[in-house]
Each structure stands twice: as C-alpha cells, then as structure tokens.
Image (spheres, rainbow, N blue to C red):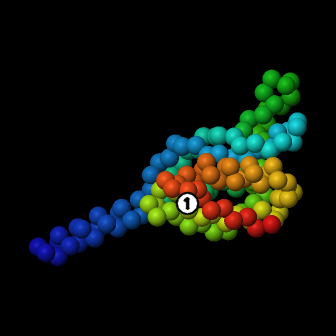
Amino acid sequence: MKQVITSLFLALFAVNAFATSDAHDRVYLVVQNIQSEEFFVERAPIIGCYGLARGPQLVQFTAEYKVTSNIGCGGPVMQDNINALTCANVVDSKESADFMSYSEVTLDISKCAAKNDPKFITMVRTAAKLNFPLKKGEVKLTLIK
C-alpha cells in the first residue's frame, strides 16, 4: 500500500512539473511607424499554450507579429510584420525568484539596423520593463550590439 501511495504522489508531481497553461495575454512590442520611422511600444494580444510564466512574452519579444494591413486603401489585403525586434535574438534569460517573470534577459541586437539609435534602445528597454514586470526593481536587460 505504501508503494501505491508513493507511486501516485510521484505521478501527480510529474504531471504538474510538465504542465502547460493556455494563455490569452498581452505582449508589448517595439514597432516602427511606417511614415515617421519613429519607434514606439505597442500592446498586442497573444494566445497560446506555454509552460513558464511570462513565457509567451519572452517568445513573442523577438518573433514576427503579423497584422492585417492595407484595409480600405483600395489594394490587396496583406499581412505585415510589425515587430521591430525580429532582427534580434534572445540569447539568455533568468527567471525571477518568485518564478512569475524574468529578472534578466540578454538580447542580441547586432543584426538590427537601428542598434545604435537611442530612441530604439529606449523603446527596447521600455518593452522589456512592461513584458517582464518584477515586484521589486525592474528586469536587467543586457543588449549585445
């Protein structure tokens, strides 16, 4: 009987260790205005299945985010990527002590054309702060140029 209880306990623990949860959340993206070429931060919805808290935000931080464009302009309706950080790559990350966010993120922006633009850097830091909030302080963002 003791072995059965122990086996059940281990099985329950194993199921929880690999559990994922559905996410209908939001992400903050660095976007470049197509007319003024100014950088800004845009809030966008994300839906998916993830295992880590703030995992969706970390994945989407540098992934393409396509939106329907050219609506009402008389031309064909298209899908355009609005994420200005698709040129970047998350090199490393460290979860926060409470496992609810990330305390450190290392981002390689060496392939980004705007890597030396102070406004771009400010928007990257702003998006990181919004995507990975901490109870105390803010995420340590390391940028590799």
**Depth check, front residue: 52 or 141:** 141
Name the residue at the front extreme: 137
Asked which quadrant contains residue 94, the reply is: bottom right
Q: Residue at x 85, y 39 (%)?
A: 34
Q: Residue at x 80, y 51 (%)?
A: 120
Picture quarter with the N terminus: bottom left
Q: Is residue 132 left or right of residue 127?
A: left
The residue indicated by pointer 1 is: 102
Q: Quadrant of the C terminus?
A: bottom right
Please tell me which residue is depicted at 50% across the width and 62% down the height of the picture. 96
Measured from the top left, where is residue 137 in percent x and y? 55, 56
33 over 113 or under it: above or below: above
Q: Nearer the viewer, residue 72 or 36?
A: 36
Query: Label 1 crowding class (10 Å Cα cut-off): few <14, some 14-19, many 20+?
Result: many
Residue at x 55% of width, y 52% of height: 133
**Image location of residue 128, percent across then percent down:** 65, 53
Q: Is residue 35 above or below residue 115?
A: above
Can residue 67 be seen here? The reply is yes
